[in-house]
Image (cartoon, coloured by chain):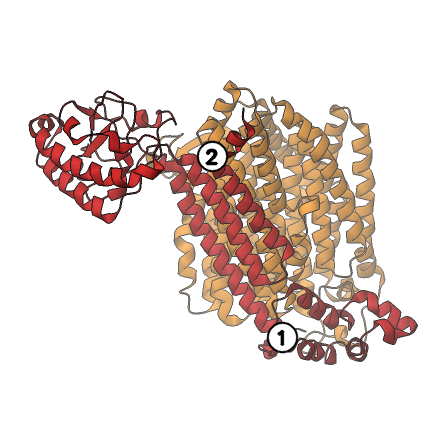
Chain colours: A red, B orange
Amino acid sequence: MDPFQFVIERYNYWIFIVLMMIGLYTVIARGNLVKKIIGLNIFQTSVFIYYISIGKIAGGTAPIYLPGDMYRRMDHDDGHGGDGHGGEGHAGDGHGAAGHAGGHGETKAGGHDPDAGHASPESAPEPVEASDLHAGDANAAGALTATDGDAIGHAATADLHGGAANALHADAAGEAKTAEPHGAESHGGDAYGSAVDFVEPIYSNPLPHVLILTAIVVGIATTAVGLALAVRIREAYGTIEEDELEAADNISEFGVADPRERAEAQAGVGGASSVSQQSASGQSDPNGRGRKLAGDRFGFRRAGAGEEGGAA
Amino acid sequence: MNIAEQLPVLPIITPLVLAPFTLLMPNGRAAHVWAMAVTGLSFLFCAMLLAQVADAGPISYQLGDWAPPLGIEYRVDLANALVMLLISAVAALVAPFSYESIRTEIDERQLPAFYCAFQICMLGLLGVVVTGDAFNVFVFLEISSLSTYAMVALGARVDRRALTAAYNYLVMGTLGATFFVIGLGLIYQATGTLNMADIRVQLSQGASNSMVEASFAFIVVGMGLKAAAFPTHLWMPNAYTYAPSAVSAFIAAASTKAAVYVLIRFTFTVFGTDFEFIQAMLTYILTTVALAGMFFGSLVAVFQSSVKRMLAYSSVGQIGYMLLGLSFGTEAGVQASLIHLFNHGLMKAALFMSVACVMLRLGVHSCAGFHGLTKRMPFTAAAFIFAGLSLVGVPLTVGFVSKWYLLQAAFDVGRPWAAFLIVASSLIAVVYVGRVVELILLREPPVDGPLSADANGEQVREAPLSMLIPMWLLVAANVYFGLRTDVTAGLAGRAANALVGGGQ
């Protein structure tokens, strides 16, 4: 297989991998606690994108199933179909309507089993996003159909449908011209109303969406807790830089910012060269002066100093 | 509605409904009583569940009556009933234990929030274990983890390093959980289902491919992070050291165990050892990691000046034993793994509890606080010694039972060198436990200095009964299950048979 095509066809996975690595790198490489949280967010978001992309079925619409929901399909010689839209459930849902305006080579008759839609091959083009304008049209179509009551009644009002669906289709086609390999513009309005068929709507797989909604909630909760911790760390330490936090901990425990310095300072071999003055003086009174120095040295407001005093 | 029919969901749903009310409690005492009641109820349900499963075989419970594989299924067999019993038992004992200890370590006003988080943590862990739906594992895992982060951070009043410990735990824990989710996404893509039993059916019909293998790798790394298996244990020593003492006792005993259980469940029930790559991973990677963890954890524990940190590193080593049992890939290995999982929960909870008692009276968890403890707090000292002996694996304690079955499993699978290494690393445990025991038994308590008296400047007294009784119940369990080996070993044996055999 052409390696270039191999890469291009799986572009969603590449986006996932690149974002994932950016996030992971940020978490590992950045010392700032808030930046780490942002990295974590990017990492998680990449997984959301991955899940959603595996749930996408080409030509599929939003997975909202209603018993009266029917798509109406006009067959063309070239196999492309434009859909009118007759469900009250999708009335006003421009996305759902436009998803089918992109056309789909497969015709399905009858049956309400939503799984049938899932079986469709990926050969169908991606759907075109509809603007609010189209949604209005779809609404009109839906309203007309709603009066029909059930599927049998559709044939009688085929003309009405044709008109409404045509308007919808034309709008969608205008957008589709650049994006769609199956040019929707090839469907003439005259074709409408000629061959009327009732087919299954094609739904995207709803499960990954549901899973990811849950994962998003979890992600937000994690971010909130992480940021709250960062705030508390800032209050207790006066900084959210990882290396400064480490230095502050070392100063309160050992009296110097870097434990390795202490050995040299105690050995007294030209301590001034490697041991900073601050660290050396902090050593004399590790618990009191050292901590104060940590605050001064990093020039941060010593917020929450009272709480810190609780350490005993 | 028949209670027995709803039993699998009751340990989860009870705290889920009741825990938020803890936040409305006017003071810490009321919240504490509420938490005791809720954890006690959960424990009761778990015990009933175990009894029922042991009698009548595995239970499948359909949440909301939605049939699996589309609906979420709770599937309880002996393996998860046993782990659920451990988690709820430790929670039910830590709840009464915690009050005296926790109120000296955190702000009085935060007590209701703490007890709320505590119950939610327990329900999350129980949920991880009970569910038969792979994605549900992730959700419950994060429920328990989020409350654990909060509980660890509460230690900030005593030592501000609890904050950075909690933060690092959060970052590592979230990475682990997200890796797990990626693994689930891959397996979902490969099989089109998230029900564990259904995944197994789908996988057994097709050959393995790189997607399934990648999925397993992601799941193992993710759960390894959560379980603090050796190279991914970095969050754990600090979190255990700086968390409030009662929290350490609970999470050390329960939370990593749930992650190890998930590893066992996914390896044997979901993927199954028929796959060549799983055999290879168990033999080459997991064995190495387990052995390295056993020695690394034990060796580092020897050099710790804080007893809490020593116990935390010891946990890294003990997780190594569990993974070693799992890595044999045999029924005997899984049995040993499950036995040790249960027993280690008992001994670590007792050990951390005795440190909490010392912390309460002396305000330190360093070795210095343990000098001459027999003369000042004899019951606490005795509890530490008994549980410590159990950790080493002295006969008549549960630790011995674990090691015995682990050794048998090692010989069974034809790896006498693994048996040798188990014994060798146990000898290191003798060193680190012995160090503290020496301080307790042979040193004189300090006569002057800050540790000669308690916080009020009075003579150091024994810990209050509300702490001693739960602690000694755990020590008694350590001895009881060490003598009645047939109870845990029998249950774990049947559980392992079901897990490795695939069917029930």
The residue tagged 1 is A308
Foreground residue among B37 and A312: A312
Residue A266 location (% of width, % of height) = 89, 72
Say the numbered circle drawn on residue B16: none
What secondary structure is found at the residue carrying circle 2?
loop
Rendered location of residue A64, percent (x, y) = 27, 38
Decide which of A222, B408 is in the foreground and name it: A222
Q: Amino acid at mark 2?
A: Gly
Q: CA distance from mark 2 to mark 1?
A: 45 Å
> Mark 1 and mark 2 in contact (Cβ < 8 Å)?
no
Dot 1 amino acid type: Glu
Q: In terms of image quadrants, where is residue B164?
A: bottom right
Q: Residue at left 19%, top 39%?
A: A168
Q: Please state the horizontal and vertical placement of residue A161, each as a whole percent of the image.
A: 12, 33
Q: Judging from the image, what secondary structure is the residue with disc 1 in?
A: helix
> Which residue is rendered at x = 83% and y = 57% of the image?
B438
**Mark 2: few, some, or many residues within 10 Å (few <14, many ≥20)?**
many
Question: Pointer 2: what residue?
Answer: B132
Quadrant location, the C terminus of chain A? bottom right
Provide the chain ID for the residue under circle 2.
B
Identify the chain of the residue marked 1, using the numbered disc in the image.
A
Q: Is residue B463 visible to us here?
A: yes
Q: Quadrant of residue A245?
A: bottom right
